[in-house]
Amino acid sequence: MSLDIKKIGIIADTHDKLSSIDSAVKKFNSEDVDLVLHAGDYVAPFAALRFKPLKAKLIGVFGNNDGDHNLLRKRFEEIGAEIRGRFADLNIGELKIALIHGEDEALLHVLINSNYYDVVVHGHTHRAEIYSVGKTVVVNPGEACGYLTGRSTAAILYVGERRTEILNLELSGV
């Protein structure tokens, strides 16, 4: 993948919350992210269409609550995005990134503790957190939907600095 990627938007657990997807797209566009990674749980295929105004490329994986995988893939293709199945292995500049939803805790632990990846991105727990294990930075952007925590969050990874921050998104309606 291109070496000129400086900012990566990270999102997960949108769970059909269209207003949160709209807020995330607006935030990612205003922050000029070059790529967005979605760690799954869009839920219904129609939700993917809300990412169409995104200026950055979108790469996602399936979560444990995603419905019709074939139609979700089709919706991703319609908006010029890519869904890679349950796991994506990405090389972004000098960073090796694993993208997974994270419901398989044993697999997630192996990815995090392998010391192979620079960054492991996951969702599933709905808890926003950033921490390191050895050389690996683990990023869970929390839940974009805000259903469980009352907080709608995403994250940005600054590639050159290898720094990540959690973003608060506007939370409106249920």
Image (spheres, helix red, strand yellow):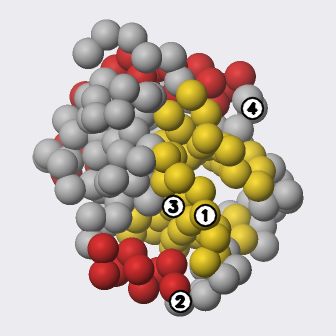
Pick whichever of labels 1 and 3 is earlier in the sequence: 3
Q: What secondary structure is marked by label 4? A: loop
| Residue type for callout 4 | Asp
Q: What secondary structure is marked by label 1? A: strand
Q: Place residue 144 in its image quadrant.
A: top left
Residue drawn where x is 20% and y is 56% of the image: 64
Tell me if mark 2 has few (under 14), some (14-19) or many (20+) residues whose alpha carbon lies within 10 angstroms of its own.
few
Pick whichever of labels 2 and 4 is earlier in the sequence: 4
Checking the image for residue 114, the label placed there is 2
Q: What secondary structure is marked by label 2? A: loop
Where residue 103 sits in the image (x, y, percent)? 27, 64
Circle 4 or circle 3, nearest the eye: 3
Where residue 100 sits in the image (x, y, percent)? 40, 64
Q: Which residue is the site of mark 3?
A: 121
| Residue type for callout 2 | Ser
Circle 1 or circle 4, nearest the eye: 1
Disc 1/disc 3 C-alpha distance (Å): 11 Å
Residue 169 in view (yes/no):
yes
Q: Would residue 87 appear left or right of 23 to someone viewing this image?
A: left
Q: Place residue 96 in its image quadrant.
A: bottom right
Pick whichever of labels 4 and 3 is earlier in the sequence: 4
Q: Which residue is the site of mark 4?
A: 32
Circle 1 or circle 3, nearest the eye: 1
Residue drawn where x is 73% and y is 29% of the image: 31
Whether residues under marks 2 and 4 lie with C-beta atoms below 8 angstroms apart, the answer is no
Q: Which residue is the site of mark 1?
A: 131
Disc 4/disc 3 C-alpha distance (Å): 20 Å
